[in-house]
Image (tube, rainbow, N blue to C red):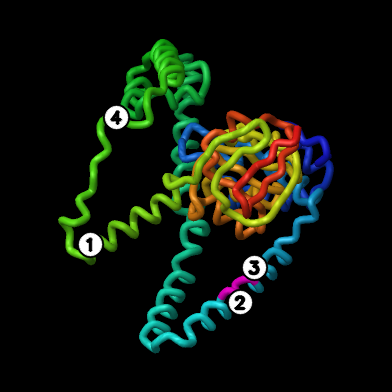
Amino acid sequence: MLEQVDDDAYPRLAGTDPDFAAAVDAYLHDYGCRVFHHAIHYPTLMEKPAILLRLVRDRMARGFDSQIIAKKLEEDRAAAMAEAHAAFAKRSAEDRERFEKALESAQQVYPIKEDCEYSTFDVPTALMRYALLELGNRLIRQGWLDSRSDVFFMELEELLAIFREGKDARDLVAHRKAERAWIEAHPGPPSYGVEPQIPFNAYPPEIQLLVKGMLWVRNEYYGFVQPQIGATETVLRGSAASPGRYTGPARVIRNESEFAKLQAGDVLICPITTPSWSVLFPTIGAIVTDAGGILSHPAIIAREYRVPAVVATKNATSLLKDGQTVTVDGSAGTVEIES
């Protein structure tokens, strides 16, 4: 059944393998509110259980073992610690103490974003989505709406007024859909006006250092500071984000609705990733993104899963096609297009 997962596979689980069905249900109970985009109109994992089944299938196909990954990461972490301590051995006691305090803080703080993202963002977003969809269901029963997802084309006050006053919302929804279509066809420039210049010299040295540090982090996260990016007939260039070299078929995934295209061993080609996309990393052989820097989410998670990664290519999702054979060199920051 897992080899031929379709949208009707989940309802058939109980009759095929009750124990596996119970395990899937338990997982969805705990993590079904996972969202795949920072916009409330995208469905959750609970609404798309076939995605979960395909991920299970792909992990089985790749022989993925999280314990092996965790052990290797622990070994790498210990080696990096030993190297750092050796480098600080000849420094002053004050420098060593500063380093140990900074390291301790980093080890405590670093996991928070990824581990807490589900509880702090996904669950609240999903619960708000479910409430709005239920409102959409009630409007459909009254004959005032054609699809429950049409609620996302209205502002909340408009939606509540329609529900209270018993108005037909279909004309308003059609107007909003037309507006969105026009906006998508006319995106406009990335920014307007002249970029402000920050007068660093006007600030005290401590503030200058803080602002420069914040700008550095921003640049390394979003990839504003990029190498010479471009594409020849056979090579796409970006920023080297996770070492290694891998050859496999490209799979362009622009959003959650296309997750089903991904197969075990594919090279994930996407605009960028968020924590909710982390479920895909055990499946892929490499990742290439349009945006991001060495501190971006796809770069960090790729390094944790030991997956080669090239980020900040700017236009990989436009240039590459599904099924093309590509070689990702995460050390050189290149993507070789073979076919």
Q: Which residue is mark 2?
A: 78
In this rendering, the label closer to the viewer, 3 or 1 = 1
Q: Which residue is mark 1?
A: 207
Q: Quadrant of residue 195?
A: top left
User: If you read the primary sequence from the N terminus, does the residue marked by circle 1 or circle 4 appear first?
Assistant: 4
Q: Quadrant of residue 216?
A: bottom left
Q: Determine contact: label 2, label 3, CB under 8 Å.
A: no
- Whole-percent x, y for residue 269 in the image: 62, 38
In three-dimensional space, the C-alpha distance between marks 3 and 1, rounded to whole angstroms, equals 36 Å
User: If you read the primary sequence from the N terminus, does the residue marked by circle 4 or circle 2 appear first?
Assistant: 2
Q: Residue at x 81, y 35 (%)?
A: 4
In three-dimensional space, the C-alpha distance between marks 1 and 4, rounded to whole angstroms, equals 28 Å
Q: Which residue is mark 3?
A: 73
Q: Which residue is mark 4?
A: 192
User: If you read the primary sequence from the N terminus, does the residue marked by circle 2 or circle 3 appear first?
Assistant: 3
Q: Quadrant of the N terminus?
A: top right
In three-dimensional space, the C-alpha distance between marks 4 and 3, rounded to whole angstroms, equals 44 Å
User: If you read the primary sequence from the N terminus, does the residue marked by circle 4 or circle 3 appear first?
Assistant: 3
Q: Between 260 and 294, which is closer to the camera in this rendering?
A: 294
Q: Which residues are magenta?
A: 76-80
| Number of other residues with Cα within 10 Å of mark 1, as a class: few under 14, some 14 to 19, many 20 or more | few
Q: Is residue 290 above or below residue 149?
A: below
Q: Amino acid at mark 1?
A: Ile
Q: Amino acid at mark 3?
A: Leu
Q: Is residue 57 above or below residue 91?
A: above
Q: Determine contact: label 3, label 1, CB under 8 Å.
A: no
Q: Taking 163 as reference, is 20 left or right?
A: right
In this rendering, the label closer to the viewer, 2 or 1 = 1
Q: Amino acid at mark 2?
A: Ala
Q: Between 240 and 295, which is closer to the camera in this rendering?
A: 240
User: If you read the primary sequence from the N terminus, does the residue marked by circle 3 or circle 1 appear first?
Assistant: 3
In three-dimensional space, the C-alpha distance between marks 2 and 1, rounded to whole angstroms, equals 35 Å
